Amino acid sequence: MHKDEKKIAEVQKKYGPLLAKTAFELGALKLSPADPFTWASGYRMPIYNDNRRFLALPEMRRTIAEAFAELLKAVDFDPDWLAGTATAGIPHSVSLGDLLQKSVSYVRSGGKDHGLKNQIEGLGANADYKGAGVLVVEDLISTGGSSIKAVEAVRNANGNVPFCFAIFSYGFAEAEKAFAELAPPCIPVTILDYDIMLNEAVRQNYISEENKKSLAEWRLDPFGWGEKRGFPKV
């Protein structure tokens, strides 16, 4: 399996601006460098993302599935299974599964504490992918931690996972490094990348060029960005 940067970029250029524009309209993406949001970690961050808001629009669910399908062609991967991450990745894995007529499963962050204590649902009695090719489907890749746990869970169930797809990524170097350090490596691929999002935000007059610069700097140092600007961790 390989990552064809040029083909991936073509798909991102085709679908990314529409996703960004719609995300701004839905409030799925909010940018506020002057008055940052407080994340659950306590850090003050200039961006808020909730891709679950796309679920309200049938045409966007379809568009996201079509974009994922084109990305699969771009990376030359034809999976036997899709594995959505619970809960936000599940609906998009189902939409893609319906479009491509693929088997669908989903991955919890951990095993249940009752019943069969499954971490992965949809595999049947053996709870085993039996060496099949599996695409992990996420809604957002942040630092990569939860996505990587899902990849590892699928691999522990004998799934072959060369790629993890998501709607959007902040583009943190930390996440790229974490995926690359898996053995074997797993390649994260998104429909909307951070640079396309910023460019569309300027084009829509949602942010200024000065805001864009600040948001670009945040990606390089997300956990130090707020402190440097007078927004300490709370």
Image (tube, grey):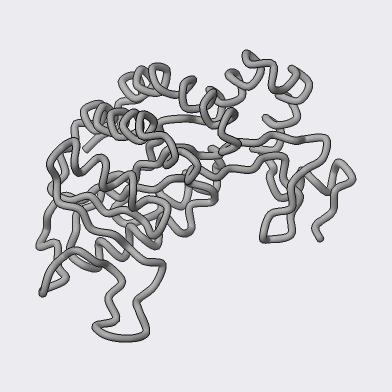
In the rendered image, which quarter contains the C terminus? Answer: bottom right
In the rendered image, which quarter contains the N terminus? Answer: top left
Residue 13 lies, in percent from the top left, at 42, 17
User: Residue farthest to the right?
Assistant: 230
Left/right of residue 41 with respect to residue 92 in the rendered view: right
**Tally of numbered discs:** 0
Residue 213 lies, in percent from the top left, at 73, 24
Residue 131 lies, in percent from the top left, at 11, 58
Quadrant position of residue 101: top left
Q: Nearer the viewer, residue 198 or 32?
A: 32
Q: Is residue 191 above or below residue 7?
A: below
**Residue appearing at x 69%, y 34% in the figure:** 31
**Residue appearing at x 75%, y 19% in the figure:** 208
**Residue appearing at x 36%, y 34% in the figure:** 58
**Residue appearing at x 82%, y 40% in the figure:** 35
User: Residue farthest to the bottom?
Assistant: 114
User: Residue farthest to the top?
Assistant: 203
Residue 147 lies, in percent from the top left, at 41, 55
Left/right of residue 33 with respect to residue 26 in the rendered view: right
Q: Nearer the viewer, residue 60 or 175?
A: 60
Q: Is residue 211 above or below residue 150?
A: above
Q: Nearer the viewer, residue 166 or 218?
A: 166
